[in-house]
């Protein structure tokens, strides 16, 4: 029994050690960035906005499709107190109807009305009559694949989609830059912590030696200064550790899970300025240019005449000829046209029972208040001017940011060259220190100091690499590669 318990405990201990080792594996930078992007709540919201913008475009391009509407119409019941001789006193009148839209491409409209009259009462046999009417209306342009959206509608939907898309790209870039900045801050705190540990250790050694050798009198100002120096360094070290804990928690909130160590390997960033012809790929310039296109389309639509619309129509109508007291069926077909203020119609038809043939024509003209149209035109012209000024401002902003990024790139390159020189010098000093220690010319503490100078450059190199990654991310956001979609 004891043997099985012991083996069980050993197995459990090994399992805990394996899990601890697995959790201690440092998360690479790419994985950190991917998880931070996946867990960012604001980005998820912006992605939903983009999805809806794309869905709205799809909906706008779709015709209504099959639709049916059925109606009873108004049903009336009447009673005649003094009916004419031979006429029933009760009458029921109804106008049930139905409307259909057939097909997404053709958008054919079919309307059916069935006026229904029934007379009864007074001992007479009920008399019922139905007078159906069927009409069909067909937009001509839909027969030839006419465009669903106008130019203005196309540019409105494009601008909305691009704004949503660029908001997503900007948020992804912001999340990644925040993670990289936090890693740089942690590296800086780690470097400062190592330096404070060394300074605190040196201060404690100096204080211990002074007390052991009785260099200063107990309670003297010099002795107190050594004590205060050690205490202050200890406080700075504790404060630095607290800052590191806060920074670690912030990094874990960004990533969305526990982080055990900084990334062991950082990718080498590719930093290069965009070419002179990349201005149009800048998000601010890109959206401003789309704004100009939209306002110009609106102005053109305001200036130009309405696009003519034509419809084919057919009607089958049943009526009662009161003169002959007979039911007649009229069949007609024609074309209708809408053009700005004019409405034109022409057709041909006939009455089946009598063989009557007729032609028809109609003209409608609407007189509108042109003062309002003049003001609308001025408003559109002003909107175009505003959009052009916005584009000019966006281009000026692009040039300013381009120059600032150029300076930052030069600064990164200058730091890189300086670090290479410092590293070569530190390697040389460390090699000399090792020889001098073997020859008894320096102490172990001086060798440790030379080794620390070399190690400190590793922290500086890591921070420089993170700053370079941050600049690379900003450059990518400056001219997104999948921007400028028209």
Image (tube, helix red, strand yellow):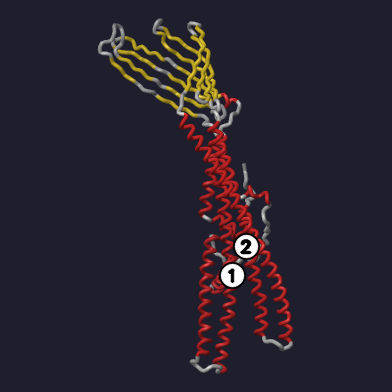
Decide which of tag 2 and tag 1 comes sooner along the chain. 2
**In this rendering, position of residue 417 left or right of residue 220:** right
Residue 142 position in % (x across, y down)? 57, 27
Q: Nearest the camera: 469 or 126? A: 469
Q: Is residue 298 above or below residue 249?
A: above
Identify the residue at horizontal 66%, vertical 72% (top origin): 457
Q: Nearest the camera: 36 or 445? A: 445
Viewer can see residue 64? yes
Residue 262 position in % (x across, y down)? 60, 67
Q: Is residue 312 above or below residue 452?
A: above
User: Which is closer to the viewer, label 2 or label 1?
Assistant: 1
Q: Is residue 215 above or below residue 413?
A: below
Viewer can see residue 15? no
* Mark drawn on residue 188: 1
Q: Nearest the camera: 40 or 284? A: 284
User: Pointer 2: what residue?
Assistant: 28
């Amino acid at each position: 029994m004891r043997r099985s318990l012991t083996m069980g405990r050993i197995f459990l201990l090994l399992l805990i050690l394996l899990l601890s080792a697995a959790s201690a594996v440092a998360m690479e930078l790419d994985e950190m960035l991917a998880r931070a992007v996946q867990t960012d709540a604001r980005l998820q919201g912006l992605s939903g906005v983009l999805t809806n913008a794309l869905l709205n475009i799809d909906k706008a391009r779709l015709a209504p499709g099959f639709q049916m509407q059925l109606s009873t119409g108004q049903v009336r019941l009447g009673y005649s107190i003094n009916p004419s001789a031979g006429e029933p006193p009760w009458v029921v009148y109804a106008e049930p109807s139905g409307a259909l839209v057939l097909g997404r491409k053709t958008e054919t409209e079919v309307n059916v009305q069935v006026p229904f009259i029934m007379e009864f009462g007074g001992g007479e046999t009920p008399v019922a009559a139905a007078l159906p009417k069927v009409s069909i209306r067909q937009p001509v342009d839909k027969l030839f694949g006419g465009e669903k959206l106008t130019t203005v509608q196309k540019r409105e939907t494009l601008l909305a989609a691009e704004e949503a898309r660029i908001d997503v790209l900007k948020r992804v870039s912001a999340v990644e830059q925040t993670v990289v900045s936090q890693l740089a801050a942690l590296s800086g705190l780690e470097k400062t912590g190592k330096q404070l540990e060394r300074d605190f250790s040196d201060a404690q050694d100096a204080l211990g030696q002074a007390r052991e050798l009785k260099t200063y009198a107990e309670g003297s100002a010099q002795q107190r200064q050594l004590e205060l120096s050690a205490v202050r360094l200890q406080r700075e070290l504790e404060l630095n550790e607290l800052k590191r804990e806060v920074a670690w928690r912030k990094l874990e909130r960004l990533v969305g899970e526990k982080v055990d160590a900084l990334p062991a390997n950082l990718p080498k960033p590719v930093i290069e300025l965009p070419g002179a012809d990349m201005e149009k790929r800048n998000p601010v310039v890109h959206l401003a240019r789309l704004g100009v296109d939209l306002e110009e389309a609106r102005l053109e639509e305001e200036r130009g005449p309405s696009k003519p619309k034509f419809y084919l129509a057919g009607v089958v109508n049943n009526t009662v000829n009161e003169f002959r007291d007979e039911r007649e069926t009229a069949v007609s077909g024609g074309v209708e046209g809408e053009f700005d203020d004019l409405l034109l119609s022409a057709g041909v038809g006939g009455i089946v029972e009598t063989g009557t043939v007729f032609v028809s024509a109609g003209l409608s003209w609407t007189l509108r208040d042109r003062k309002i149209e003049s003001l609308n035109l001025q408003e559109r012209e002003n909107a175009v001017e505003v959009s052009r000024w916005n584009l000019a401002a966006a281009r000026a902003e692009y040039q300013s940011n381009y120059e600032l990024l150029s300076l930052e790139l030069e600064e990164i390159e200058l730091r890189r060259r300086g670090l290479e020189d410092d590293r070569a010098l530190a390697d040389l000093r460390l090699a000399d220190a090792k020889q001098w220690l073997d020859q008894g010319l320096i102490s172990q503490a001086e060798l440790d100091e030379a080794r620390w100078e070399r190690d400190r450059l590793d922290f500086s190199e890591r921070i420089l690499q993170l700053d370079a990654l941050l600049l690379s991310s900003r450059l990518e956001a400056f001219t997104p590669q999948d921007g400028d979609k028209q």
